[in-house]
Amino acid sequence: MHLSVFLEVRDTLKINGASTDAIHLRLFPFSLKDKARSKLYSLPLGSVTTWDELTKVFLAKFFPPSKTGSLRNQITSFAQREDESLYEAWERFKDLLRLCPPHGL
């Protein structure tokens, strides 16, 4: 969710001559707090030079394979509940997708 909101805010900015990666890398630290900020500042200087590298580092930290696997399993085995409307089921399914950015589906 954090990455989605960050990208939504970032998309409102346009800086002439600046690449998308440069904008992402410059703004991202301001969106972090607590453990996430500590994680960013614990990385060796110059070890992350692209947005893709940075997202991989953060997803690996906050979405380890076990968590991703569990959420992916919930997504692939999703079923509408008996007492649930189609709309409610669809909203619950979309929430599952949002909870697991690297779901790969």
Image (spheres, grey):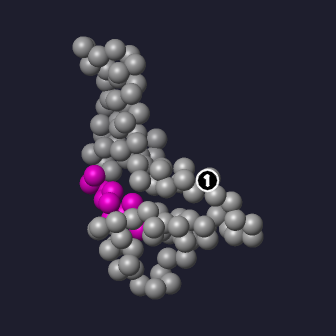
Secondary structure at numbered mark 1: loop
Q: Which residue is drawn at 39% across and 65% down?
A: 32
Whether residue 59 appears in magenta in the rendering, the answer is yes
- Which image quadrant for residue 87? top left
Q: Nearer the viewer, residue 15 or 42?
A: 15
Q: Position of residue 54 (x, y in %)?
A: 47, 68
Residue 49, percent from left and from top: 55, 76
Residue that badge 1 annotates: 11
Density class for disc 1 (Cα within 10 Å; few <14, some 14-19, many ≥20) is few
At x 40%, y 39%, the residue is: 97
Q: In the rendered view, would you say 26 is above or below 93?
A: below
Lateral position of residue 54 relative to residue 39, left or right: right
Residue 14 visible, this angle: yes
Magenta segment: 57-67
Q: Nearer the viewer, residue 4 or 73?
A: 4
Q: In this view, does 88 lie above or below 105?
A: above
Give the residue displayed 45% in from the left and 70% down from the top: 29
Q: Is residue 56 visible?
A: no
Query: Which residue is farthest right?
Result: 17
Q: Looking at the picture, does residue 31 appear above or below residue 90?
A: below
The x and y percentages for residue 20 are 64, 64
- In-image side of 90 versus 48 (left or right): left
Q: What amino acid type should be assigned to the residue bearing mark 1? A: Asp
Q: Does the segment drawn in magenta span residue 63?
A: yes
In the rendered image, the vertical position of residue 76 relative to residue 89, given as above or below: below
Horizontal side of 23 relative to 89 (left or right) equals right
Seen as rendered, the residue at the extreme bottom is 45
Location of residue 95 in the rendering, given as x and y in whole percent from the top left corner:
37, 36
| Rendered residue at 31%/20% (across/down) | 80
